[in-house]
Image (spheres, rainbow, N blue to C red):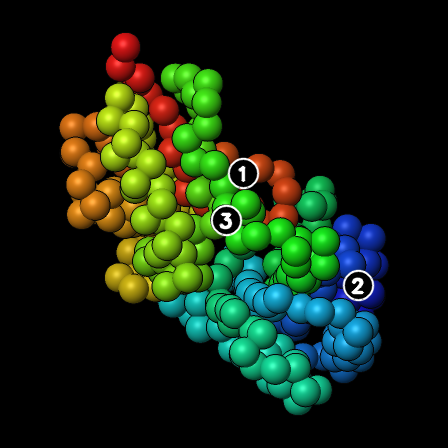
Amino acid sequence: MKKILFLVFLFLNITHAQTDNTHVVYFETGKFNVPEIEKNRLVLFIQSLKDIEIERIAIYGFCDDRGTDSYNLTLSQNRANAIKKIFSGFGVDDNLISNVDGKGEVLLRVVSSDNINIIRGLNRKVEINVEYIDSDLKTVPKEEKEPLFLREGLKVGDKITLDNILFKTGYSYVEKESLPVLEKMAKALRERDDIYFTIQGHVCCTRNERDAVDKGTGKRNLSLARARYIYDYMIEKGIKRTRMRYVGLKNKYPLGKETKYDRRVEIKITSILK
């Protein structure tokens, strides 16, 4: 029976979960050693990357809904570590691997099924996301590729997604490479002191619209903590408290794309003074 279910997971993985820059590896219940058939598929995927110029690789581990938060975080981290070890064993530069993180349990949205074993099997996984270097962008000056934060014609209700603000996976602070982008955002908001706004934090991959766990504190308030981080940063950079507030929106508003797009912070314009 287990073998049949595993083949079902494999079929669903091939037909639903993969694109040319993603790969999914499935695991058996409570285990983090990679099944042989999944290891063979992973090796083929790694070999397909050999002629591609890679910017970064992110590895995320997940579990099904059984077990405590602490147990699932540890198990999912061990699964991510196991995949990273295989990448390293095949000569992939460790510097290209930006994230190796366990995310705990996840509610899968890509398939509808009444069979709880299939749902759980699809949640016992590691997702691998590969970002390629776009050769068409190599000749574009860096300053031209940076986002225009406060474009002309902004109106109340508009949202600005901070696409280039990269948080440490599972934590409420940003990677060092994101600080220059945050500084530009703060500068733009200082210059537009007529704008009042709300900082909205979002997370992905939690069940029943719950928040994710902040690994730094152990609290299930990651979306709120990330929004608070941006709020505190803006205060430090001279933005008045009276102009802004922050909220954590948990996993209430998924975008329906790849899960990485749901891990985001947005600024919603609430008022523009005349």
Asked if marks 2 and 3 touch (Cβ < 8 Å), the reply is no
Q: What residue type is disc 3 on?
A: Glu
Tell me, for residue 10, which label it has, or none.
Answer: 2
Residue 131 figure quarter = bottom right
- Tell whether 73 sits left or right of 64: left
Residue placed at 36% from the left, 24% from the top? 269
- Tell whether 222 sits left or right of 96: left
- Tell whether 165 sits left or right of 141: left
Asked if marks 1 and 3 touch (Cβ < 8 Å), the reply is no
| SS category of the residue bearing label 1 | loop
Task: Choose mark 2 or mark 1, whichever is in front.
Answer: 1
Residue 257 figure quarter = top right
Q: Marks 2/1: CA distance? A: 25 Å
Q: Classify 96 as above or below 121.
A: below
Q: Tag count in the figure?
A: 3
Q: Can the viewer see residue 151 in this picture?
A: yes
Q: Marks 1/3: CA distance? A: 30 Å
What residue is disc 3 on? 143
What residue is disc 1 on? 254
Residue placed at 44% from the left, 67% from the top? 73
Residue placed at 63% from the left, 48% from the top? 258
- Percent across and percent down for residue 173 are 32, 58
- Percent across and percent down for residue 74 are 44, 73
Q: Can the viewer see residue 121 in this picture?
A: no
- Percent across and percent down for residue 111 are 72, 45
